[in-house]
Amino acid sequence: MALGLMLGVASQAVQATIVSASFSHSGLSIQRKGHWYRFTLGQLPPENPGSVTTLSWQIRSLAAWPQPPSVLLCRDRDCQRIDSVAGVSRRFAGQGSQGEWSIAVALSGSGPQQPPLLITGVSLTINRAIP
């Protein structure tokens, strides 16, 4: 009897709808090593309900990266390091999706980047669950 009750409760779980929001930035030129370049991508206002399920991003450049950059994915002031210039992650999973989203990039070292690295676009897709 206890097993029947547990199954009955589990089968009545609330289903959520997954919706996506996509943001992009046209890019810029990275001129200096050791300097953070922030790409402000967009904002989900407070009236946009839902919690993050997955995030996907891509940072496109005209030339090959001279070395792997440091990359931060940020919602407002909460930033988390990500390991690559493109991918899918569950970072921020379960957290609210509202706020300003941005990606920051830095090349290691210091001084001028020769030749400058042209970033041709930055994109972010936020998949969120809405109950």
Image (cartoon, rainbow, N blue to C red):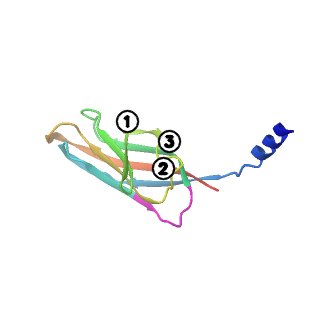
| Residue at left offset 36%, top offset 49% | 79
Q: Earlier in the sequence, mark 3 or mark 2?
A: 3
Name the residue carrying label 1.
Answer: 83
Tag 1 secondary structure: loop
| Residue at left offset 23%, top offset 39% | 107
| Residue at left offset 72%, top offset 49% | 13
Name the residue carrying label 3.
Answer: 90
User: Over which residues does the magenta segment extend?
Assistant: 42-50
Q: Earlier in the sequence, mark 1 or mark 3?
A: 1
Residue type beneath disc 2: Thr
The answer to which image quadrant residue 42 occupies is bottom left
The local crowd at label 3, few if under 14, some if 14 to 19, many if 20 or more residues have their Cα within 10 Å, is few
Which mark, residue 125? 2
CA distance for labels 1 and 3: 13 Å
Looking at the image, the residue that sits furthest to the bottom is 47
- Is 9 above or below relative to 101? above
Residue type beneath disc 1: Asp
Tag 3 secondary structure: loop
Q: Is residue 83 left or right of residue 31?
A: right
The local crowd at label 2, few if under 14, some if 14 to 19, many if 20 or more residues have their Cα within 10 Å, is some
**Which secondary structure is most common in the magenta stretch?**
loop
Q: Is residue 41 magenta?
A: no
In the picture, the quarter occupied by the N terminus is top right
Q: Earlier in the sequence, mark 2 or mark 1?
A: 1
**What is the x, y in percent for residue 36?**
24, 48
Q: Is residue 49 magenta?
A: yes
**What is the x, y in percent for residue 111?**
12, 41
| Residue at left offset 41%, top offset 49% | 123
